[in-house]
Image: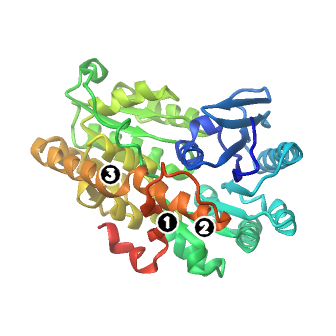
Amino acid sequence: MTRSNSQPHVVILLENLPVSRDRRVWREAEALRDAGFLVTTICPADGNRRSVEVVDGIEVRSFKPAPEPSTAAGFVREYGTAFVRMSAELLQVMRAGPIHAVQACNPPDIFFPLAALLKLRGIPFVFDQHDLTPELYETRFGRKGLTYWVLQKCERLTYLFSARVVSTNASYRSVAISRGSLKPENVVVVRNGPEPVSMQAGPANAALKGKFAHLVVWMGNMGPQDGVDQALEAVRYLVHDLGRTDCRFVFIGKGDVLDDLRSMSFGLGIDEWVHFTGWIPDAEAFLYLSTATLGLSADPPGPLNDKSTMNKTLEYMSFGLAVVAHDLTETRASAGDSALYADTGDPAGLARAVYQLLDEPERREAMGRIGRQRIVERLSWPHQRQGYVAMYKRLLAFKGSDRIQAGAETESTNRPSQERQPELT
C-alpha cells in the first residue's frame, strides 16, 4: 500500500475475528479511509494462512491463529499466540513507514504493553472497547476469583495507557470514566449502528418458513453469555407448554457452544421447530430477516448484558422487525417501543412475549416501523461514524477529507448531557 507523509496512518488491531466478519471494525476502517486516513488492520486469518492484501484501499494483514480454545489454558495459548504474531505484524508495518495511531479492539484486553511502548514513542493508543471483559468472564463462567481480578487489572492498564477510549454506549462510557479514571472528554460513544441502506427488508421468501405460518430469527455469536440456551428453553415452553406449533425458529451464527445447542435442541424435543444455519453469507442472512415475523434477543439479565448493546437487536430493527427481548437497560435504550420486553427474566417470559406478538400483526408492524425509524434517524452507522472520525481528526490534528460531514467536528457524542441513559428511550 502506497503511503504519503501527508496522510495520518492508523493501525487497527482485532484479535477475536477476521476483520471481514466484524461489521463494526470494517465500517470504522472505511470511515477513516473515506476521511483521508491510511488504514491498516491486523487480525486473525479466515483460515490457516497468513496473508497481506489490500481490500477496498485498506491494508489487511492477517496472521495464522491458534486453535480455537475450549479450556482456560486454551484461551491463554490463543491470546499469547495472537499477541506475539500481532506485535510482529505491527513491527513490520512500522518498519515500512510511519504510523500515527494504533487502535485495539477488545476482547481481550492484552495490548496494554504495546500501548505503553507506543506512548514512549509518542504514538497515541485508542482503545475500542467492545466488551467489559471482567463481566464477560463472570457471565461465561459464573464466578470471579483470580482470573476476574487479573482481567480487572488488564482493563485498568489498558485505560491507563489509552489516549482515547471508544465506547459502544453510555453505560460503557460511564464504566470507562469511573473504573479508568478517565477524563469525560477523552471517551467518545460510537454505537454499533447498522447501515440502513444495505440492511433493510427486501422481498420475503416464503419457502424459508417451510410448513409454518411464522418465522422467528435469532442471529449472532453463540457463546455461553448470549442466551441461546434460554431461547431454546423458550421454544420448548412455547411448543410444549403453550401448545404453539405454527412457528419456525432459525438460529443464524456459530460459536463455541453451537454443538451443545444442537444437542440441547434434540434433548428438549424441539428439533422439528428449530434450525441452525451456522455462519452464512450476508445475502442469505438478510433474506431470513426479510422473511421473519419477529427478531429474538434472548441475552439474559446480568452484569454484562444489562450494560451491553446487542448488535442483533439493532439489526432486527433495521429490517423493520418487532423485537422480543429481556428488559435490559441498554436494550431498552436502543429499541424503545420497538420491542416487547419479557420482564420476568426467564425463558417462559420470552415465550409468552413471542406468543403474544404472533397474534398481533398490526402491533408488530407498528413496532417494526418504530424500530426502523430509530435506526434511520438516530442509531445508524452514518450518524455514528461522524463522532468516530471527529475523534481521530482532533487527536491527530488532521483536517482530512470533506467526504465526512462537517458536523462531525462537534464530537457531540462526547457531551455528558447527551449520553445519559434515557436519551434513546
Q: Secondary structure at mark 1?
A: helix
User: What residue did someone put label 1 on?
Assistant: 409
Q: Is residue 253 visible?
A: yes
Q: CA distance from mark 1 to mark 2?
A: 8 Å
- Label drawn at residue 190: none
The kind of residue on which mark 3 rests is Ile
Closest to the observer: 368 or 202?
202
Q: Nearer the viewer, mark 3 or mark 1?
A: 1
Chain-order first, disc 3 or disc 2 = 3
Closest to the observer: 354 or 263?
354
Quadrant containing the N terminus in the rendered view? top right
Q: Is residue 191 visible?
A: no
The kind of residue on which mark 2 rests is Arg
Closest to the observer: 248 or 239?
248
Position of residue 58 in the picture relative to residue 292 (left or right):
right
Q: CA distance from mark 3 to mark 1?
A: 22 Å
Report the residue at 65% width, 82% height from top. Answer: 181
Q: Is the residue 120 above or below the residue 254 in the image?
A: below
Q: Is the residue 326 above or below the residue 73 in the image?
A: below
Chain-order first, disc 1 or disc 2 = 2
- Label drawn at residue 375: 3
Q: Are the residues flagged by discs 1 and 2 in contact, CB closer than 8 Å?
A: yes
**Residue 265 in the image: x percent, y percent?**
45, 33
**Residue 191 in the image: x percent, y percent?**
47, 58
Number of numbered labels in the structure image: 3
**Residue 107 in the image: x percent, y percent?**
66, 54
The kind of residue on which mark 1 rests is Glu
Q: Is the residue 288 above or below the residue 327 in the image?
A: above
User: What residue did someone put label 2 on?
Assistant: 394
